[in-house]
Image (cartoon, rainbow, N blue to C red):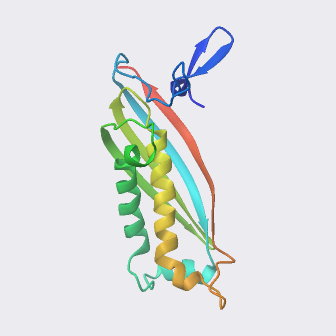
Amino acid sequence: MTDEDTQIDGDERDLTHVDEEGNVQMVDVGSKPDTRRRAVARGTIHLTESTVDAIRDDQIGKGDVLATARIGAIQAVKHTWETIPMCHQIPITNVETTFDVADERVTLTVTVETTGKTGCEMEALEGVTTGLNVVWDMVKAAEKDDDGQYPDTRISDVHVVSKEKHQG
């Protein structure tokens, strides 16, 4: 839970997404000042070595895996407010995607920047999870075993690496 998700009242923490009657509500950030914010999230998809080699050599039948995943990640960042019920629509000022391709995995790092009243870590997380799901979709034919299953394929370690808030 972040500071933006809670209000501290003495020693108690009251959820701000719930009103006095227990109804879910969006947090009112209208009185908060605009600040520059940055969040970085990362996650990994584990694949077979032959699939990773095919990604490197641009030999996946559906096309350029990383370019398509990059587009998917950026689109997800821009649409986070539509999929996370209590997220605010925020002005995205920058999105960076970085792929680290190793022997049996691809790690995606998404950095999101905004100037606004609320943070952008959910946008960074949405970018990572969607980008990795796009990788999976692009390579699923190569990853399936004879029974149509994905014994070596998994997404893991999705997390917020950092979030920053700068006044002024």
Q: Position of residue 61 (x, y in %)?
A: 42, 86
Q: Return the residue found at the far bottom.
A: 146
Image quadrant holding the N terminus, namely top right
Q: Residue at x 54, y 18 (%)?
A: 20
Q: Residue at x 59, y 14 (%)?
A: 8
Dividing the picture into quarters, in which one does residue 49 lie? bottom right
Q: Please, is residue 31 above or below residue 93 in the view? A: above
Q: Residue at x 44, y 32 (%)?
A: 119
Say left or right for 63 vs 52: left
Say left or right for 74 vs 133: left
> What count of labels does the image hold?
0
Q: Position of residue 10 (x, y in %)?
A: 65, 8
Q: 33 or 28: which is nearer to us?
A: 28
Q: Please, is residue 126 above or below residue 85 in the view? A: below
Q: 159 or 162: which is nearer to us?
A: 159
Q: Return the residue found at the far front.
A: 21
Image quadrant holding the C terminus, namely top left
Q: Position of residue 98 (x, y in %)?
A: 46, 57
Say left or right for 4 vs 73: right
Q: Please, is residue 80 above or below residue 118 in the view? A: below
Q: Residue at x 38, y 35 (%)?
A: 88
